Every structure is written in C-alpha cells, then in structure tokens.
Image (tube, helix red, strand yellow):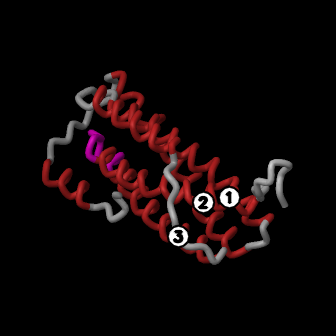
C-alpha cells in the first residue's frame, strides 16, 4: 500500500521492528551505565541490587535476540536517542553528587526513570507481538516486562528504606572506598558496549 506521494505506508510490523531495535540498543547502553552506577553507589545493598539488575539486563539482551528470531529478523540495533539522553543525564548526576550523601538517592531517582522508560517500551512491544500473532515473542517480552516492573519496585523500596534518609543525613552514609570491589564491578559487565 502506498500513500498519495507514492511512499510505502508503514505498518505495525515496521513499528514493532523499530521499537525492538531501539529497546535492544537501550538494553546494551543500560548495561554499560549500570556498571558505572554500581561503582558510584556508596551503599553495598544498592550496589548488589544494581549488579543483580545488570545480570537481568544481560538476560534481557539475550531474550530480545530471541524475539528477533521469533519474527525471523536479523538482530539489529537502532540508536535509542531517549536512552542516550538519559545516560548523559545520569553521568551529570554522578558528577554533581558523586561525593555527596545524596548520591544514592540521586542514583535511585535516575534508575526509576530508566525503568519507566523500559516499562513503556516493553508494554507496547508485548501488545504489538500479541496483535501480530506471535505468542512466543509475546511470552519473552512479558517475562522481560515483569522483571522491569519488579526492578522499578525495588528502586522505590530502596528510596523509601534508605537512600532518601541518607540524603537528609538521618542515617549513616556508607562510604565505600574499597577499590578492589569497585574494580570487580567495572569488570562484571559483558553487555557494556
């Protein structure tokens, strides 16, 4: 089907592929960013949560590659300009609050923004995979969406339980200067590119 100007009309298939390519790119960029966030955190509970989410992110990349396969499409990436912007904002937050007791609250706020972006993308992809009649892809996307929603809840609980209080100076700020542990965090990502 063509428009009056002769250009091909884009369909839901085209939209699905575009969003899939962008979320695939986003997951790669988020993986690299999570390594930096774990290093910046001054709370071991938060570092562990971020590193656990890094492992989930790596699994998300693999599941997305399977989704491409469900549609018999080559695995590709399209630059996610939204995530590029969010990652840039995260670097600014880290630079501005890196030596502050507010760093953990700043990181949690940033991570919540990332999760909401991902939840929106996966919700759309899931609905579209269902409409396009691909239950295998829909199941993979639903698994990822469930994990992203759980991660969002984790960050909310972390904000309520510790990081916001730390930012006020009402709880002990766990300043971690253990460079060996931080070096291990920097090496822990296979997604980081």
- Residue found at x 64% / y 47%: 120
Residue 5 pos. (x, y %):
81, 48
Instruction: Please say if 73 is above or below 127.
Output: below
Dot label at residue 125: 1
Magenta span contains residue 41: yes
Where is residue 43 shown, x and y percent of the image? 29, 42
Q: In 3D space, how far apart are the residues under numbered discs 1 and 3 (Cα atoms)?
A: 16 Å
The residue lying toward the viewer, choosing from 100 and 193, is 193
In this rendering, the answer to whether 72 lies above or below 143 is below
Q: What element does badge 1 sit on?
A: helix
Q: Nearer the viewer, mark 1 or mark 3?
A: 3
Q: Is residue 193 left or right of residue 18?
A: left
Q: Which residue is mark 3?
A: 75
Q: Quadrant of residue 141?
A: bottom right
Mark 2 — residue? 20
Count of numbered badges drawn on the protein? 3
Mark 1 packing: few (<14 Cα in 10 Å), some, or many (20+)? many
Query: On screen, 85 above or below 147?
Result: above
Q: Check if mark 3's residue and mark 2's residue have beta carbons within 8 Å.
A: no
Most common secondary structure along the magenta stretch: helix
The residue stretch that appears in magenta: 39-47
The quadrant where residue 139 appears: bottom right
* SS for callout 3: loop
């Amino acid at each position: 089907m063509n428009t009056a100007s002769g250009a091909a009309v884009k369909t839901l298939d085209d939209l699905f592929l575009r969003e899939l390519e962008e979320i695939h790119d986003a997951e790669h960029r988020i993986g690299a960013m999570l390594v930096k966030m774990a290093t910046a955190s001054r709370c071991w509970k938060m570092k562990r949560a971020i590193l656990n989410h890094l492992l989930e992110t790596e699994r998300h990349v693999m599941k997305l590659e399977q989704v491409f396969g469900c549609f018999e499409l080559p695995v590709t990436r399209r630059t996610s300009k939204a995530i590029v912007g969010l990652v840039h904002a995260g670097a600014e937050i880290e630079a501005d609050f890196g030596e502050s007791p507010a760093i953990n609250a700043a990181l949690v706020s940033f991570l919540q923004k990332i999760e909401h972006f991902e939840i929106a993308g996966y919700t759309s992809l899931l609905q579209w995979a269902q409409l396009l009649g691909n239950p295998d892809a829909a199941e993979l996307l639903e698994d990822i969406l469930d994990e992203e929603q759980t991660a969002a809840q984790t960050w909310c609980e972390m904000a309520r339980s510790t990081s916001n209080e730390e930012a006020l100076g009402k709880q002990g700020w766990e300043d971690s200067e253990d460079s060996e542990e931080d070096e291990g965090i920097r090496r822990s990502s296979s997604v980081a590119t």
